[in-house]
Image (spheres, grey):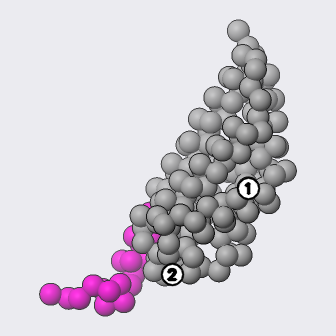
Amino acid sequence: MVGKGVVMMFSYRLVRLIETHADALAGGLEERVQTNSQVAHFRKIPAHELKERVYEIYRHLGEWLLGKNELDIEQRYREIGSRRARQMVPLSEVIQAIVLTKENLWDFLKSEAVVDRAIEIMGELELLQMLEMFFDRAIYYAAVGYEEQLARTPAEAQGVRAV
C-alpha cells in the first residue's frame, strides 16, 4: 500500500507544475474562449480581465485546493457570477467558461505529466478529485451570484417585459 504522504507529495508536484505554467495555461484558455462559439458573450469582456482571473486560479491552485475553505470559494465565485450577470453574459456561458477552464487544465496535465508508477496514479487521482470538487463548487457559486444579481436587477434591465 502506498502511503498518503507519498501521494500528497506527488499531488503537490503536479500542483506546482500547474502553478509554474499559469501564464501559459491562462493564455491557452483565452485562445479557447476566442474560438469557442459556446462562450461568444465572453468575447465582449476585455481579454485581460478573463486572463487575469484565470491566471489567479492557476497560479494559486495549491492555495485554492488546500488552503481555502468553502466560504472562500463561495465568495469568489458569487462575485464572478454577479459580475458576469452585470455584463449580460448568459449563465450557460458562465458555466461553460468554468468547464473550459477545467478542460484546459486536464489537457495540460495530459500533455505534461507522465504517469508510469502506481504512486503517481494514486496522486493524480487524488488531485483530480480535489480539482473536480473545486470546479463543481465554482460552478455552483457562480450560478448563485449570477441569480442574486438578476434578483437585484429590475426585470426591464434583464430584457424581460412585465406581462
Residue 53 lies, with reference to residue 71, above or below; the image says below
Give the residue at x 71% y 45%.
Answer: 108
Give the residue at x 81% y 52%.
Answer: 21
Q: Amino acid at mark 1?
A: Leu
Q: Quadrant of residue 74?
A: bottom right
Q: CA distance from mark 1 to mark 2?
A: 24 Å
Mark 1 or mark 2, whichever is nearer to me? 1
Q: Answer whether labels 1 and 2 touch (C-beta < 8 Å).
A: no
Q: Position of residue 9 (x, y in %)?
A: 81, 29
Q: Secondary structure at mark 1?
A: helix
Let me know if residue 121 appears in the view: yes
Q: Secondary structure at mark 2?
A: loop
Q: Position of residue 58 (x, y in %)?
A: 73, 54
Q: Amino acid at mark 2?
A: Gln
Left or right: where 34 falls relative to 17? left
Magenta stretch holds residue 149: yes
Q: Quadrant of residue 116?
A: top right
Left or right: where 162 falls relative to 122? left
Q: Which residue is mark 2?
A: 87
Q: Which residues are magenta?
A: 141-163
Question: How many numbered circles are shown?
Answer: 2
> Dividing the image into 4 quarters, which one contains the N terminus?
top right
Magenta stretch holds residue 127: no
Q: Position of residue 54 (x, y in %)?
A: 68, 62
Give the residue at x 39% y 77%.
Answer: 150
> Dividing the image into 4 quarters, which one contains the C terminus?
bottom left
Q: Which residue is mark 1?
A: 25
Give the residue at x 42% y 67%.
Answer: 91
Q: How dense is the environment of label 1, judged by Cα within 10 Å: few (below 14), some, or many (20 and up)?
A: many
Q: Nearer the viewer, residue 28 or 85?
A: 28
